[in-house]
Amino acid sequence: MNIDTLQTLCLIVIGFAGFLRWDDLSQLHADDVNFCDGYAALFIEKRKNDQFREGHWACIATTGSTSCPVTLLKRFLKSSNSSGHIKLFRRVSNHRGNISLRQEPMSYTRAREKVLSMLSTIGLDPTRYGLHSLRSGGASTAAAMGVPDRLIAHHGGWRSTEAREGYILESKSAILGVSRSLGL
């Protein structure tokens, strides 16, 4: 897998698992990542609702699966030779077939193009998604798996129920489960 594909895959799984906005992902630096026993901790210096600019630690668990966000992040950091205060997600250079990461950060537009292209390759309709789908999809999946609202709110940095609920999309099976539970 080339560094361009690995970076896009890493952006997707970290955004999804961390319930992160593009603004959160785009400001991450290599030295904002700490690997701990069983998880990775990502320091996000400024979040949309961080009024006092205290920063936020997003902790993402090691899963042991082939799509493990922590394993992919380690692999990406090693393959990209990223260290220090350099942006984590950067522009790609393709010079005579040699693909590498540049110093400049990846733009919103390019990140969106890369994510939608990857979603398209696995058969999803790219017109139904955007970068915010990572945050919404992660939160919706956690809710569908029965994760308590309080933990979803903490993980995603939501301060109000209304804000959090705006991100969570109920699955058809969850909606049908309501009428099934009536015992009729």
Image: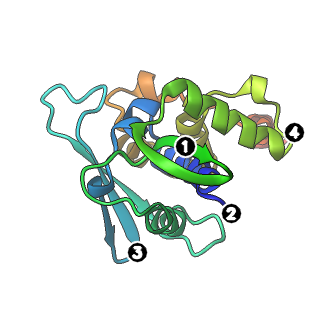
Q: Give whichever of discs 3 and 1 has the lower sequence position.
A: 3
Cα distance between the residues tagged 2 and 3: 25 Å
For disc 1, the neighbor class at 10 Å (few under 14, some 14 to 19, many from 20) is some
Cα distance between the residues tagged 4 and 2: 52 Å
What's under tag 2, amino acid-wise? Answer: Met
- Residue 165 in the image, given as x and y percentages of width and height: 51, 27
Image color mode:
rainbow
Q: Can residue 43 be seen in this view?
A: yes
- Residue 48 in the image, given as x and y percentages of width and height: 31, 26
The reply to whether callout 4 and callout 3 are in contact (CB within 8 Å) is no
Q: Quickly name the residue at label 2.
A: 1
Q: Quickly name the residue at label 1.
A: 92
The quadrant the C terminus occupies is top right
- Residue 128 in the image, given as x and y percentages of width and height: 75, 25
Q: In this view, does 67 lie above or below 141?
A: below
Q: As rendered, which of 122 and 110 lies closer to the eye? A: 110
How many badges with numbers are in the image? 4
Q: As rendered, which of 91 and 156 lies closer to the eye? A: 91
